Amino acid sequence: MNAAVTPVDTSHVDAGLAGLLSRSGLKPLRVAGRWLLPIVQGGMGVGVSAHRLAGSVAAEGGVGTISSVDLRRHHPDLMAATEGLHARPGMDEDSKVRINAANVEALQREIRSARELAAGKGLIAVNVMRAISDYAAHVKTSLESGADMVVVGAGLPLDLPDLAAEHPNALIVPILSDSRGVALIVKKWERKKRLPDAIVIEHPRLAAGHLGAAKIADLDDTRFDFERVLPEVRDFLRKAGIEKEIPLIAAGGIRTHADIARVQALGADAAQLGTAFAVTEECDASPEFKRVLAEARDEDMVTFTSVAGLPARAVKTLWMKSYLAAEQKLQAVAHAKARCTKAFDCLAQCGLRDGFKDWGQFCIDNQLAAALRGDLKKGLFFRGVGALPFGQQIRSVRELMERLLTRDVAQAQAEAPALAAQLA
């Protein structure tokens, strides 16, 4: 007699996409008691992934992610209230407090709006960089404002369980790149009576933005390869007796149904995509921003050291070329400044402000905000490697989800012999 099959609750997924998932050969993501599409939209700042993108992804049944950094830029009243504060000598601390307060208010608004768009589907996450100075405030604001999940990268979030102590039902998720980092976080968090609710495993050679390696020379280290790190992490979790409690989300260079199937075969439960969502119609950035990313090829990518002291990957735009040409000269004269260029000290440690000679020497808030507006002359356009699902076309979140859940003809033909063997 066959054992009873527990029905899958797909109430948090769009009905049409739930049907596609059932025919896709992919496994759903099970997290927080919900069955979701195995698709996570990565957090992208400044303002690239705000409420419109995150809410749209969640409404389809995926995980939509707001980046918490400098969200006031989407709110004209908050920008007006903080305009010119960086130019007030002797008022640095007051300016910092007011700008940070405006960003907290913007984060609260964005979470509320994303939840309204999601209408109970999927999950709304907030990505908070460990490297930002207002990290703790952003984590607490996210949880207090009703975010389902807080995801932290750009540094080890050893204190995240403490910050989330008053929100035991909220999900807390670290972004890591190798099995050693996973083991460290799990052991440290266990002492605080908390486990990660999921773990994002990001490949630094393939991802966009700030990368999970100590220096550029480490990006090609084989310890980051999905073929190695996913089985290693699975083995660690299995031996610790917590394998079924912590889903793994692979991130970096994932563009197709076949990519998702590959990482699931290696031990991942879901895949995270950033750039592919950055070029959707619903992305919160300008049309010109999307065009730059959509038209960039792998040979247009450059890896450099950010002002946060981390390797980073972006499109080699006019500004990027000019900066790289001057980088060594700028680093040679680097020195600690009396105040932050923008007054609010967005990073806890900043190469430009603090005079770290081996770190980036530019204002990252200025350059990312310019990219959000589509300014090629000043913008820093983060992008991951690999061709995009629709080439240079800007399509909707719905179309992207459908594409990711659908086998292409070549893939189906390649899988047919194995499937036939299983059924024989």
Image (tube, rainbow, N blue to C red):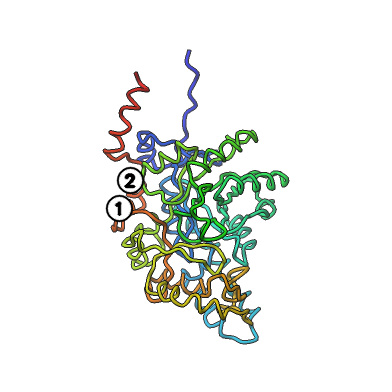
Q: Of the numbered discs in the image, which one, if any, rests on residue 390?
A: 1
Q: SS for tag 1?
A: loop
Q: Of the numbered discs in the image, which one, if any, rests on residue 135?
A: none
Q: Nearer the viewer, residue 410 or 55?
A: 410
Badge 1 amino acid: Phe
Residue 394 image offset from top left, x and y in percent? 31, 58
Q: Mark 2 points at which residue?
A: 403
Q: Mark 1: few, some, or many residues within 10 Å (few <14, many ≥20)?
A: some
Q: Which of 272 and 115 is in front in this view?
A: 272
Q: Nearer the viewer, residue 121 or 376?
A: 376
Residue at position x 62%, y 67% in the image = 133
Residue 74 image offset from top left, x and y in percent? 46, 68
Q: Quadrant of the C terminus?
A: top left
Identify the residue at the far top of this view: 1
Q: Mark 2: few, some, or many residues within 10 Å (few <14, many ≥20)?
A: some
For the question of whether residue 92 can be seen, the reply is yes
Circles 1 and 2: CB distance less than 8 Å? yes
Badge 2 amino acid: Arg
For the question of whether residue 115 can be seen, the reply is no
From this view, report whether residue 263 is shown above or below residue 85.
above
Residue 63 image offset from top left, x and y in percent? 47, 48
Residue at position x 63%, y 74% in the image = 97
Residue at position x 40%, y 71% in the image = 373
Q: SS for tag 2?
A: helix
Q: Nearer the viewer, residue 233 or 325?
A: 325
Identify the residue at the far bottom of this view: 89
The alpha-carbon separation of the residues under discs 1 and 2 comes to: 9 Å
Residue 374 image offset from top left, x and y in percent? 37, 71
